[in-house]
Image (cartoon, helix red, strand yellow):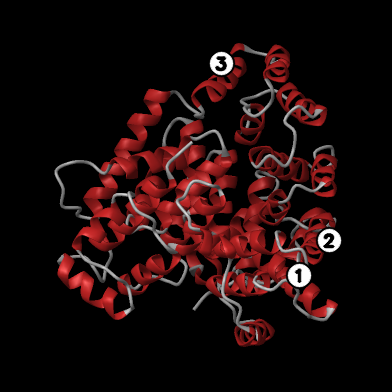
Amino acid sequence: MYEGNKRLAWLLATTRLLGPQTRGLSRAEFVAPMKELGVRIDSSRISRWESGLEYISPQLVEAYEKVAGLRPAQIGAVRRTLARDGHLITRPAERAGATSDPGVIDELLDGLESQRIRGDQWIRLSDQLRSYQSVYLQRRIWQDLTDHLVDELARTASIPYLARYEAAAALMNAPQAQPYLTKSVGRYVLDPETRVITPVLQVLTEIADPAASDLVLRLMTAPSAKLRSSAAIAASAMIRRGNLAPDHKVLEVHVGHELVRGGRPSVVVLDLASRLTDDQFERVLRSATDDVTRTTLRQARSNWELVDSEQARIFSDHIGLHAELLCARNSADPDQMLSRLVREALFHVHRSRRHLASSLILASPYATAVGEVVLRLTNHADDRLASLCWSMVARMTAVISATALAERLDEEARPELRTRAAAALMWVGGDLPDAAVRTLVSTVEDHETAPDAARAAILALGLADRRDELNQLLVKCPDDLRRLIQWACERGPAVAED
């Protein structure tokens, strides 16, 4: 468990103290523009909000974003996740939903038609559609809307993805929208050519629906390793939300089969194993083939971390302190919340907690500094630590230099980690520099040596809209990679927000 109000309060405080437009402002200087936005504010209220002792409304968060010069929903999307998880102080009026405004729906649907709608606007649209007991839209419009949202979920990352996911979570709990969104998700995931699965399949975890859980369980036995892994991630999320019983036989069988394959258990397997019932876990433990695997499983189950506790503490403190130095934070005491979030983002056994901690860091002024330090640590001699750093880098691509990422991909000689490095470049999108493009093309050409890295590189080139390079690679690749190239070209580039 965690205190969501403390985390949101930390985000407001760091935004005010370290944000580019608010840094150096006295409290009185900060109060003035907040009052202009209609916020009832004084110095004592700031203290209560920023210590997590008082209710933090969506309107207050929006005002902080505007005064600090942040993107719309940069903090608001994270706030919604905390509230939806039940870890935030909320009020009945907020839980009742948005005030209905038909004009807003028309305006946002027009924006959707012209392909120009940001993550915060998706949230606004979903809230408006939920605010009515019944909304008359033609079936085609409903289906086009949810198809469009699913398509963008597969082509966004970072806070823009989180905002769209929050919109999808809201629509999944709207009786009128749910059938259309469920159909869009199912159609996308079950398409045999689909390659980016997890960001979309996660949407089904938001509802307690037998058909949704049956689909996830069925996918856990699919021939495709990618599908099985994505389904296992979704199953863990469903268990967390109480939408899937943890004692289902398929879950235990999946973990057992993955362990029999040998090698160190993946983070996906450890997450799912940590959620099994005690009896299931003991049986899985007995099926493990070596002592290292058994130790790793017990550790993940007991302290909820992927590495030794002391190692996690030292590593996260190191990153936190270096990030504070890069941000020139003026305080004698280290930022304990930052270190805690870095630790969770890297080492928590549950994917949901790693991603939430990463989102909190991404929404904060520390984001670029943390990304820079973690990228440096991807060259760590311990493959396990380096792999976890690469995973966090992939979640923070939005604040990391694409050139620096490409240079690290060039330097990374370890095959498994080279795949993770190429995957991290997927979310750079249209800003991919020419040097990075050359590195990715070279990675695809070297597909016989590192086939998984080649697949990740193809997806990165597709999301960067580098069709010319992909078309040139068609003649150099085997059939399976040619199909992936065609799919990457058809899906289109990563979604860019103005």
Q: Amino acid at mark 1?
A: Asp
Q: Which SS class for mark 3?
A: helix
Is 214 located above or below residue 329 in the figure? above
Q: Amino acid at mark 2?
A: Arg
Which residue does the numbered mark 2 point to in the structure image?
Answer: 187
Residue 189: percent from the left, percent from the top? 79, 56
Q: Amino acid at mark 3?
A: Thr
User: Along the polypeptide, which appears first: circle 3 or circle 2?
Assistant: 2
Q: Residue at x 46, y 55 (%)?
A: 405
Is 196 located above or below residue 245 in the figure? below
Which residue does the numbered mark 3 point to in the structure image?
Answer: 295
Crowding at label 3, few (<14), some or many (≥20) Cα neighbours within 10 Å? few
Residue 461: percent from the left, percent from the top? 62, 64
Q: Which SS class for mark 2?
A: helix
Which of discs 3 and 2 lies nearer the camera? The answer is 2
Q: Nearer the viewer, residue 108 or 390?
A: 108
Residue 250, disc: none
Residue 438 seen by the camera: no
